[in-house]
Image: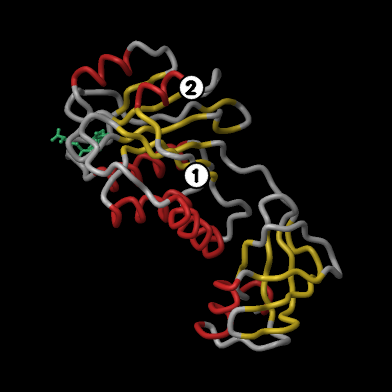
Amino acid sequence: MDASITSPRLFIQTSLHEGATVAASAAQAHHLGTVLRREPGGAVRLFNGADGEWSAQIATLRRDRCELTIGARLRPQAPEPDLWLAFALLKRDATDLVAEKATELGASALLPVLTARTVAARVNLERLAAIATAAAEQCERLTVPWIAPPVALPALLADWPAGRVLVVAVERRGAPPVRPPAGPAGLLPAGLLVGPEGGFTGAELDLLRRHAFVVPAGLGPRILRAETAAIVGLTLMGASAGI
Ligand code: SAM
C-alpha cells in the first residue's frame, strides 16, 4: 500500500502549498517522535481545512519541534456536510466523547448549550478543540469542526440562523423519527439539539415549539443517555442524507 495513504495526518493552521516548509505544534512533534517513533524523512499528511490534503516529509524532528516539507497535493478541498450539533453540556468524560464522535460523524460545528437541567456549567474549549482536532486527523476528514462557547438555550434559539432547521431530539412524546432536511443536492443546513441527562423541562419544550425552525424528532423507543442520543442522532441524520 502507498505509504502516503496510511501515514499520520496532521492539522496545520497555515496555508499549504508544494515545496513550503511548515512547523508542527509541540504536541504534534511529541506525538510523531515519542508516540509514533517517526524519524526525519518519514511521511505524513497535512490538512488545514481549506487547501485539501497534502503529502509531506519530516525535515527535522526534536522533542517538541518539527518541521515538515510539503510535497504533492493528495486531495482537493471538497464540500462537507453543514450539520451542527448543539448539545446540553454534560460531565467532562461524556462531553469529550460527544466532541470526538461528533467529529468522526461529520458535524461541522459543536455548540454546547446550558439548559435548566444541565449539570455542568463550564467547559474547557481548548481541550474540546484538541479532541476534535485529533478526531479529524484520525478519521480523514478535511476540516475540524468549529466549537462555540456555551450559550443558554434561549440565546441559542434567539440567534439561530435563518434557513437552518433545528432537529430536536425529544424522548417519550411520540415524535416522528429523525429525518434530515435534504434537498436534491444533499443535506440542507441543519442542526441537531440533544438535551441533558435530566431531559428538557416542560417550559423548554414549550419554548422550542414556538420556533418555526424547530422539528421535534424521536430516536426510538428506548431512553438513550444524552451522549448516545447525540451519536445516534448524527448517525441517522448523516446516513439518511448519504453523508
Ligand atoms: N431524563 C429523561 C427521561 O427520563 O425522560 C431522559 C433524558 S435523555 C437521558 C437525554 C437526552 O437525550 C434527551 O433530552 C433527548 O434529547 C435525548 N434522547 C434520549 N433518548 C431519546 C429518544 N428515544 N428519542 C429522542 N431523544 C432522546
The reply to whether residue 2 is visible in this rendering is no
Q: At which x and y percent is residue 181? A: 48, 26
Q: Residue at image x 86%, y 70%?
A: 19
Vertical comparison of 202 with 85: above or below = above
Is residue 18 left or right of 121 when viewed as pictured?
Answer: right
Mark 1 CB within 8 Å of ligand 1: no
Residue that appears at 52% across and 85% down: 34
Q: Residue at x 64, y 85 (%)?
A: 62
Q: Does 60 sit above or below residue 218?
A: below
How far apart, in angstroms, are the residues tagged by discs 1 and 2? 16 Å
Q: Which residue is mark 1?
A: 147
Residue located 34% across and 11% down the image: 210
Image quadrant of ligand 1? top left
Residue 50 x, y percent position in the rendering: 71, 50
Label located before the other in sequence (1 or 2): 1
* Residue bearing the label numbered 2: 159
Q: Residue furthest right?
A: 19
